[in-house]
Image (cartoon, rainbow, N blue to C red):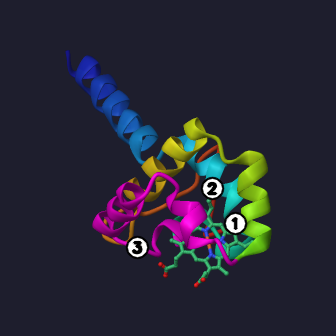
Amino acid sequence: MRLAFIILLFLSFSFLQLQAYNKKGLNAYKKLCVQCHGGPFAGAGMHTTEEWEDIQSNSKTPLLDIHKNVADAMEKFESALNKKRKKYLFKFLINNASDAGTVPGCDGNYCGQD
Ligand code: HEC
């Protein structure tokens, strides 16, 4: 019984860890944003949850709007920012916003600040 409890505790803990960020969003960030905005958690920390939500909902093409004067970014987005990826990316940004309280640790996908 006690062992079952410990296993359950361990499982729920690792589940929480997995939920701390989504891998697809992290990868989208790495592909599209790292070059100019630094590590994924630093990038997500540019804004609070509410700010990211506003940015996401203010426009159908929020990232294009923000970067319309940044030719390199526009080029990158044009080739690689599809709808699905945008969804995952915003999920990642919102979940890891400056006020989200996420403390990035090390796992198979990510370690450190960049
Ligand atoms: C080629 C470089 C480049 C890439 C790639 C890039 N950005 Fe930017 N980003 C900039 C620059 C330069 C600005 C400032 C634009 C301005 O002020 O006109 C900016 C501004 C922003 C802002 C507004 C800053 C603020 O203080 O509100 C956000 C948010 C942002 N970027 C998010 C992203 C995200 C998310 C990605 C990945 C999808 C990304 N950027 C990819 C260069 C880039």
Residue sitting at 35 percent across and 40 percent down? 16
* Number of marks: 3
Give the mark nearest the N terminus, 3 or 2.
2
Kindly indicate whether the residue at mark 3 contacts the one at mark 1 (C-beta within 8 angstroms). Answer: no
Residue picked out by circle 1: 34
Residue picked out by circle 2: 29
Give the mark nearest the N terminus, 1 or 2.
2
In-image side of 37 versus 75 (left or right): left
Instruction: Say which amino acid is labelled 1.
Output: Val
Q: Is mark 2 within 8 Å of ligand 1?
A: yes
Q: Is residue 68 one of those drawn in magenta?
A: yes
What's the magenta region? 42-69
Pick whichever, 86 or 100, lies toward us.
86
Pick whichever, 7 or 82, lies toward us.
82
The overriding secondary structure of the stretch rendered in magenta is helix
SS state under label 2: helix
Instruction: Say which amino acid is labelled 2.
Output: Tyr
Q: Is mark 1 within 8 Å of ligand 1?
A: yes
Q: Residues within 10 Å of mark 1 (few under 14, many from 20)?
A: some
Q: Quadrant of ligand 1?
A: bottom right
Q: Is mark 3 within 8 Å of ligand 1?
A: yes
Instruction: Say which amino acid is labelled 3.
Output: His
Kindly indicate whether the residue at mark 2 contacts the one at mark 1 (C-beta within 8 angstroms). Answer: yes
Point out residue 113 in the picture as x, y percentages from the top left corner. Answer: 61, 70
**Distance from the alpha carbon under mark 3 to that under mark 2:** 15 Å
Q: Quadrant of residue 59?
A: bottom left
SS state under label 3: loop
Give the mark nearest the N terminus, 1 or 3.
1
